[in-house]
Image (cartoon, rainbow, N blue to C red):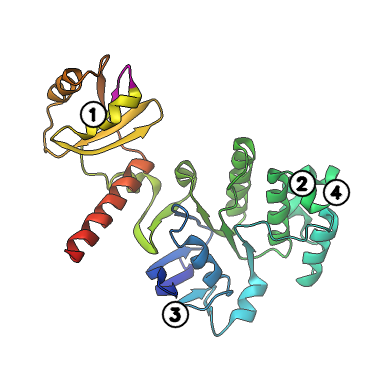
Amino acid sequence: MSAVLITDGVSKRFGKVEALDGVGFSVDLAELFGVIGADGAGKSTLFRILATLLLPDAGRARVLGLDTVDSYRMIRTRIGYMPGRFSLYQDLTVEENLAFFATVYGTTIKENYELIRDMYVQLEPFRTRRAGQLSGGMKQKLALCCALVHRPELLLLDEPTTGVDAVSRLEFWQMLDRLRRLGITILVSTPYMDEASRCDRVAFMQEGRILAIDTPSGITGLFSKPLFAVRAAEKHHLVPVLRSYPHAASVYAFGSTVHYTDSRPSPDMGDVAAWLESNGIGGVGIERIKPGIEDTFMALMESMTSRREAADA
């Protein structure tokens, strides 16, 4: 399968801040590839370089076989880009925004209507409303319509679901799945771990570096320690007490439970329960569970931090 997008050692610095540090990965034709990371991980800087809006300080990126520096004009006609912040014209109506972007790309709404139909039928009742007056979900749909109106070969979507309600997030990902099946390659970034499972492959990103790249199921296979869910009657006291246990490796609150790993290869969870009860934690329940994507991300972040601390020592 041919690669639509390739980055090789891409780095970018803003003053003392190293936003990207040797980023390298590739995205295949008609693949839905996710870049997962918290705010400040470097996702937006990476997307702006791929959209030819920033120059890398080192390394190179190729989009649709073209160098992002040497062939930026050609790339811009063949991609669709949604930045993290809503960037359409707030004072123009829904219809005027879409018509404007179609004109910029030398096409018409009618020519590619089939591609945007599922989204535009939801926007049509508001076609005369100014973009700035739309809800977050409707703004998101309008931005995607404008990015698709010229039928791009590659979509670059930078945190498109941030700040959007759960129903709109689900609808948006269903739209992306349909676009992928139509042969459009999609690179999407998100801070939401649950959205990673909707991608063909994901890259975990932190502090400008790629921590791991794999399928969602392959990513969870990187979690190497036994993982346990711990419950207790007084959860707000559970985390600090559990972290004080001599053999605790990691302790994180996850919903109604606390996810725990032990520094021993074969942990005695009966001993852990007894420790908690001796420290005033009642109603303790412990069960072994399978790690999720968020568990793996936290473990990879801890590993990266440990390596950096060791290198600085």
Q: Mark 1 points at which residue?
A: 241
Q: What element carries label 1?
A: helix
CB of mark 4 within 8 Å of CB of mark 2? Answer: yes
Quadrant housing residue 250? top left
**Circle 1 or circle 4, nearest the eye:** 1
Q: Counting residues from the N terminus, which is met first, the one under dot 3 or under dot 1?
A: 3
Q: Counting residues from the N terminus, which is met first, the one under dot 1 or under dot 4?
A: 4
Q: How far apart are marks 2 and 1 (CA)?
A: 47 Å
Give the residue displayed 62% in from the left and 54% down from the top.
182
Q: Mark 2 points at which residue?
A: 134
Which quarter of the figure is the N terminus placed in? bottom left
**Circle 2 or circle 1, nearest the eye:** 1
Q: How far apart are marks 2 and 3 (CA)?
A: 38 Å
Indicate the amino acid at tag 1: Val
Q: Mark 4 points at which residue?
A: 129
Q: Residue 57 got which mark?
A: 3
Residue span colored magenta: 230-234
* Within-10-Å neighbours for mark 2: few <14, some 14–19, many 20+: some
- Decide if residue 233 is on the left or right side of residue 52: left
Q: Counting residues from the N terminus, which is met first, the one under dot 2 or under dot 1?
A: 2
**Circle 3 or circle 1, nearest the eye:** 1
Of residue 250 and residue 138, the one placed in the foreground of this image is 250
